[in-house]
Structures are given as C-alpha cells and as structure tokens.
Amino acid sequence: MKRLILMGRSEAGKSTLISALKNEKLEYHKTQYVGFEDFIIDTPGEYAETKTLGGALGVYSYESDVIGLVASATEQYTLFPPCIAGMATRPVIGIVTKCDAPDARPDMAELWLRECGCEQVFFTSSYERNGIDELLNYIKN
Ligand SMILES: Nc1nc2c(ncn2[C@@H]2O[C@H](COP(=O)(O)OP(=O)(O)OP(=O)(O)O)[C@@H](O)[C@H]2O)c(=O)[nH]1
Ligand SMILES: [Mg+2]
C-alpha cells in the first residue's frame, strides 16, 4: 500500500477520514502531534495553519508515497497556495471531505485543490462513507 500523508487545516476532517478508511468507529480526537500509522500519516491542522510549523509538513512528506491535500466542502477559504503541488517530490492528490454537510460546496473545494495542481480529486464523506472505497483503492493500487 502507498503511505498517504494528510495535510489541511484544523477540523478539515483528516482524522475522521483516517478512521473511515480503517473502518473504525468515528470519534472526535483533536490531533496534537504527527501520527505515523501503517499506511497513513496524520498531521495536526496547525501545521498547515502556522508558518513556523509548515516547513515540517515538507519534511514529513518525505516519509510518504503520496501527499493528500485535504479541504472540507464547508471551508470558506483555502490555506493552500496555487501550484503548491509543483513543490512536492511526491504525487499530490486532493481530498474533499464533509460532502454530506448541508452547506457543502464540494465544487468550491475542488476548484481550490485543482489550483494547487491536484490532477486527481476525491470527494468523500466519512459520515456516509462516500468516496472512501475509491480512496482506499487508490492507496492500494
Ligand atoms: N458532516 C461531516 N462532518 C465531519 C466529517 N468528517 C469529520 N467531520 C467533523 O469535523 C470535525 C473535525 O474532524 P477531525 O477529523 O477531527 O478534523 P481534523 O482535520 O483531524 O482536525 P485537527 O486534528 O484539528 O487537524 C469533527 O467534529 C467531525 O465530526 C464528515 O464526513 N461529515
Ligand atoms: Mg486530526
């Protein structure tokens, strides 16, 4: 399996997505440190939000096979700069989370991720398990 590192702001739904990928019960736990797991690296949203911590995401990305930029469909703006995928030495995919939310705008999140340079974008809902199998297949193949 490819090892996927997830990056994105706090509350984007990264850790919940990991629980869904592992078919575990969904429980909220604030991520307080970078978590290495078998095929996933979870990062705290603060790393994407804070300039001084942001560099660590670049370093941790070297431990992965693929980088997942996570944007919730409920986000009002993006933290990711345009063309950021070009700075990575790994494939970069986009993952839209919370597509089930009543105020979801997956099209807006997709636009931001495409501007980052993500050629492949997955649309997911951890609550409804939409898009989870597609993402798992991508990691496995
Ligand atoms: N509607 C909806 N809410 C979700 C979904 N996934 C996560 N959430 C909610 O979003 C909130 C944040 O989820 P987390 O998975 O902890 O977010 P995170 O990106 O890991 O956040 P940090 O650990 O702070 O970086 C929680 O209250 C979740 O229940 C989803 O698929 N749909
Ligand atoms: Mg988390």
Image (cartoon, grey):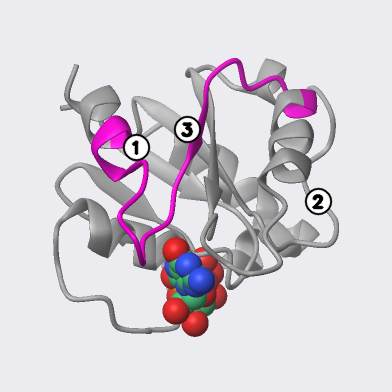
Q: Is mark 2 in CB contact (under 8 Å) with mark 3? A: no
| Three-letter amino acid code of the residue under disc 3 | Ile
Percent x, y for residue 35? 32, 62
Relative height, residue 69 to residue 28 (above, below): above
Q: Earlier in the sequence, mark 3 or mark 1?
A: 1
Relative vertical location of residue 52 with respect to residue 59 in this rendering, above or below: below
Q: Which residues are magenta?
A: 115-135
- Circle 3 SS class: strand
Please tell me whether mark 1 sits on a helix, a strand or a loop: strand
Is residue 136 or residue 47 the one in the foreground?
136
Kindly report the distance in space between the C-alpha atoms of the residues bearing marks 3 and 1.
6 Å
* Residue denoted by label 2: 78
Neighbour tally class for label 1: few under 14, some 14-19, many 20 plus, Cα within 10 Å: many
Q: Which mark is residue 4?
A: 1
Image spot of residue 15 (x, y percent): 38, 65
Q: Nearer the viewer, mark 2 or mark 1?
A: 2
Number of numbered labels in the structure image: 3
Q: Would residue 124 be counted in the magenta stretch?
A: yes
Quarter-of-image position of residue 18: bottom left
Q: Quadrant of residue 16?
A: bottom left
Marks 1 and 3: in contact by CB < 8 Å? Answer: yes
Question: In the displayed structure, does residue 1 sit left or right of residue 102?
Answer: left
**Three-letter residue code for mark 2:** Thr
Residue topped by disc 3: 67
Q: Which numbered disc, 2 or 3, marks the residue that appears first in the sequence?
A: 3
The structure residue drawn at horizontal position 78% and vertical position 37%, both measured from the top left corner, is 112
Task: Report, in whole angstroms, how far the alpha carbon at label 2 lies from the one at label 3.
Answer: 17 Å
Would you identify the image quadrant in which residue 30 lies? bottom left
Residue 67 magenta-highlighted: no
Which amino acid does the dot numbered 1 rest on?
Leu
Give the residue furthest to the front. Answer: 102
Q: On screen, 54 above or below 34?
A: above
